[in-house]
Image: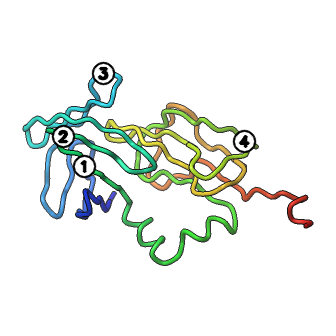
Amino acid sequence: MKYLVTVNKNTYAIEINDENHIIVDKEEYELDFKSIGNGPLYSLLINGKSYEGYVEVHDNVWQVQHQGNLYSVEIDDERSKRLMSLGGATAVTQGDYYLKSPMPGMVVSVPVTEGQVISEGDILVVLESMKMQNELKSPCDGIVSRVQVSSEDAIQQDQVMLVLSPEHNDEHEKK
């Protein structure tokens, strides 16, 4: 899977080969990334060199504090970035939205149920990949029309996990 990662306004092309190998701007690295305890402290080994940092996610932006420096990190998969630049993001409000896994991983939780009304930004699925948990949030208001995964399901990249339908308020439409 290829990603575009922006760290403090510098963008890098990252390709994940497997759980322990990545390519950053055409240079390969061996890594191991683990949470320490239940807090935001993480350990990262890159080519055998150890790093520690505090990692928190707020509104799809990762805040990473390492050796007294704060880094703001935004992650986009290359395919979604291309679709958004072509105007694909606007299609979400015009029909069903299919939440697809941005990467292979394990479903940690699905905090929504079929028929539930949700708002833009609500967490739809928590996915673990490469030992990191990712909260996948709704890009729009809607109703959960289908849930196709459950906790502990192993999923593939681009697998549909759930479907959102536009919320229709008949009384509002009559006015």
- Residue at coordinates 23% horizontally, 40% vertically from top-left? 65
Q: Is 148 situated left or right of 69 in this image?
A: right
Packing grade of label 1 (10 A; few <14, some 14-19, many >=20) is some
Reading the chain from its start, which is encountered first: label 3 or label 2?
3
Q: Is the residue under label 4 in contact with that under label 1 (CB below 8 Å)?
A: no
Q: Which residue is mark 2?
A: 66
Secondary structure of the residue carrying numbered label 3: loop
Which amino acid type is marked by label 2?
His
Q: Cα distance, mark 3 to mark 1? A: 22 Å
Reading the chain from its start, which is encountered first: label 4 or label 2?
2
- Residue at coordinates 44% horizontally, 65% vertically from top-left? 80
Secondary structure of the residue carrying numbered label 1: strand
Q: Which residue is mark 4?
A: 114
- Residue at coordinates 63% horizontally, 59% vertically from top-left? 97
Q: Is the residue under label 2 in contact with that under label 3 (CB below 8 Å)?
A: no
Q: Cα distance, mark 4 to mark 2? A: 41 Å
The label on residue 37 is: 3
Q: Nearest to the eye among marks 4 and 2: give it.
A: 2
Packing grade of label 3 (10 A; few <14, some 14-19, many >=20) is few
Q: Is the residue under label 2 in contact with that under label 4 (CB below 8 Å)?
A: no
Q: Quadrant of residue 13?
A: bottom left
Which amino acid type is marked by label 4?
Glu
Reading the chain from its start, which is encountered first: label 1 or label 4?
1
